Each structure stands twice: as C-alpha cells, then as structure tokens.
Amino acid sequence: MRLVAPFPETPLLAARLGLLTGSPLQRAPVTYVSPCTKVQRFHTSAPLRALPAPIVWLVLKPLQKLLAIVLGRSIRKWWASLPPNRRELMRQATWQRRWQLAAGGAGLLLLLAIFFLTHLDEAPIVGRARLLVCSREEFLDLARQMSEVYMEMFKDSLISPDDPRHKVVETVVKLLVQKNQDVAEIATMPWNVHIVENSTINAFVLPNGAVFLFTGMLEAVADIHQLTFVLAHEMAHALIGHAAEKTSMSHVVDFLSFIFLTAIWLVCPRDSLAVLGQWIQSQLMQFMFDRPYSRKLELEADQVGLQLAAKICADVRAAPVFWKQMELLDQLTGKDIPEWLSTHPSHKNRANQLDRLVPQALKLRASCNCPALPAQDPLVVFSTSVHKLLEAQQEKQTQLLPLNQDSNPQLHFDLSQKAKKRSVQRSGVP
C-alpha cells in the first residue's frame, strides 16, 4: 500500500524529524483505504455557545474552602461561648436523638450513592467505569473558551500554517485521525493544529480537539516517529476525556475536603492549629489522591497513544526511546525530581511501561498491513550511543583526577543489556 501527496519540500525539517525515504510517515494521504481506516475531513472549531456550567464550579471552588473555614470556626466559637450547663443539655439532647441523626446520615449516604451511580460513565477506548459530573457538551463549551484564551495568549508567537513545521505536525494529526476511524470519538471531534514558537518542551490537546505544540517539542523529538507518539499521547487525553474526568473527581475531592476542613476548624482549639491541620489535610489530598490519580491517567494516555500511533504505521519502538531521552535530559540539566512529587510518572517508569507494550503494538501495526520496520531497534541505538558517551566521560574524568581517587561518571543511566535482549525478543515480530 502506498501513501500519496508528499510532505512539503523542507530539507532541514525533514532531516531534523527523520523523514527518510521509504518511511510510512513520510507522505500525507489524500485517500487511503484499508481495514484499519476510513477517510475523514479536517474540521474547524464550532462557534462559542452559552456559558458552561463548569465555570460556576471553578468560581465556587475557592468560596467552598472559605465557607468551610467560616462554618467550622463559627461553630467552635459558639460552642466555647456556651455555659457548661447548656453544653450538657445539648449533649443529652443529641444522645436522645441519636437514632434520628443516624437515619439522617444514612439518608445522606444513600443520596450520595444514588448520585454516584447515576453519574457513572464508561471511558471511551479503555472501557473502564468513571464518574462524570458535567456533561460532555458543557465541558466542550468550556474547552472552546479555553481555546480562545490560549489563542489570545499565544497570538504573537503562533507560526504560520504555511510554515513547514506546521505542515508536518498537521499532516501527522491528519494521519492519526484518518487511520483511527474505528474510534468513534476521533471521527466526530474537530481537530485544529497550532504551533507556538517557544523553547518549552510541551504539547497539549484541549477537549475540543485544539492541538497546541511548542517548537521546543520539535527540537526534543529525534524523528517523526517520536513526534507521532507525542501527538497521539496528547490526542488520547482528549479522546478518553481525561480533563472532564479529572474535573469530576476534583468535585468529589472538594466535597470531602469541605467536610474534613470544617471538622478541622471545629475541633482544633486554636486557629494556629487549625491552619496547620488544614495544610496537612491539603498535602495528604495532593500526595495520596490527586497526584497518583493524575499519574494513572498519564500512563493510560501513553498506552492508548501507542495504539493510535501503531495504526498509522509509526515505529512504535521509538516511544520508550523518547522518554529515555527525556530522562537523560533531566539528569543533564539537574531537573530530575522524585515521581511522588510530580503529577506525571517518572520518565524511567513511562519508558519501562511502553517497552512492555511495544510487542503488542507491533502486532497491531502488522494487522494494519504496514511495511516492515528496520531490523535495528531504536532503543538499542540510543542505549549504545549513551553508553559510549558515558565511557568517554569516565575516561576524561580518569585523566583529570589523581590516580588514587576513584572517578565516577556524573550521569547515572540504566544501560544494561536489557535493551539488546528486548530487541532480540522483538525481532520475531514483523
């Protein structure tokens, strides 16, 4: 099978992104018919509609915390102002009505359970159950407004659609859309590409299909296959609806936080202790729920993105190499932070997960009648290159340091023989 309508003649960009002759991603399709795809037209965004409900939640969120503080503190002050005999009477009255209060609490729990069950949704592609408070239409309205905000923010740094870099990214997005028509969400969503002239290594896709990619990301990827995976990963977030899911879960967390925060300001005898308790509660929510949940969604987008990239005949073996590169870059720049402090998984863990998923993605790629991949595994090439770099650095340090002093390379990179073993294991997969 052949893809027609070649990329624009851009020698420098082609060399940067590895657009070599024979690569299945070198050419942009005008029409392509196979069991894995249909033809889809590129859309533009729909006009802005009414004010979405999620904005109300965003406005009320800080007021919710303030209300919890005021409510808990007011009840504590009121209780402290009561005379001892009045407190004892209220304790007795509460005990006498304990069954009514228990029934009220059970009724509240029942209402919460009904609300939870009636707002369950099945996540597209992955098929897992999740909670969605806001409807898809309401969240798309919010996404359109966010898109306008970003367009205004980046209006002076957006590169022209005629720029070769823009055309390359747009072509890859078109390929991902056209070859994944079996995903219902990808066919119905409008996709728009915006390239921002900025050295930051970043890319994101809004829930309405607006793709924003910084030129720093184009410098970070080694070839077109890595760029394809990055775009597929970000599109996977939009297809699965991770933004709406995170927003819905944040409402649940905010509700629980309201209860805990009110209890903290009610129980703590002094405001200083209540402030300390509030800080501890917020940190526990962050590190025990918010950040682990965000890391889970990132790994899920990696998995789905790898599948999307496989169906457009990308070299899926390049995906773990990209995160190996990011890991090395962080070590060189001193920006490597522990995973538990981040909303994203560590580069090492992402590379390891993708490496485990590569054999399955290669089978999916082969089922789409894609041309055979080069025998040389990109991970082996990368590992060999870094190994030589470390050896050269160690040799240089050995020459500079006294003979009686041990020398260790500044970089600590896992370059065991696992990469070569995995390459041998993959060699049997077309």
Image (tube, rainbow, N blue to C red):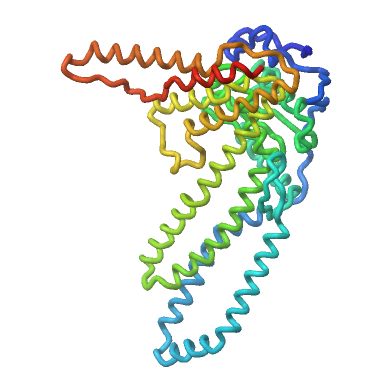
Residue with the most extreme left position: 404
Q: Quadrant of the C terminus?
A: top right
Near-viewer residue (96 or 89): 96
Question: Residue at point 61% right, 25% down?
Answer: 359
- In percent of width and height, residue 99 lies at 58, 84
Near-viewer residue (162 or 155): 162
Q: In which quarter of the image is the N terminus?
A: top right
Q: Considering only vertical position in the picture, is 309 above or below 97?
A: above
Near-viewer residue (75 or 127): 127
Q: Considering only vertical position in the picture, is 42 above or below 89?
A: above
Relative side of 342 to 310, left or right: left
Q: In which quarter of the image is residue 399?
A: top left
Whether residue 155 can be seen here = no
Question: Residue at point 70% right, 18% down?
Answer: 162
Relative side of 363 to 399, left or right: right
Near-viewer residue (309 or 60): 309
Question: Residue at point 59% right, 31% down?
Answer: 203
Q: How many numbered marks have been drawn onto this rendered protein structure?
A: 0
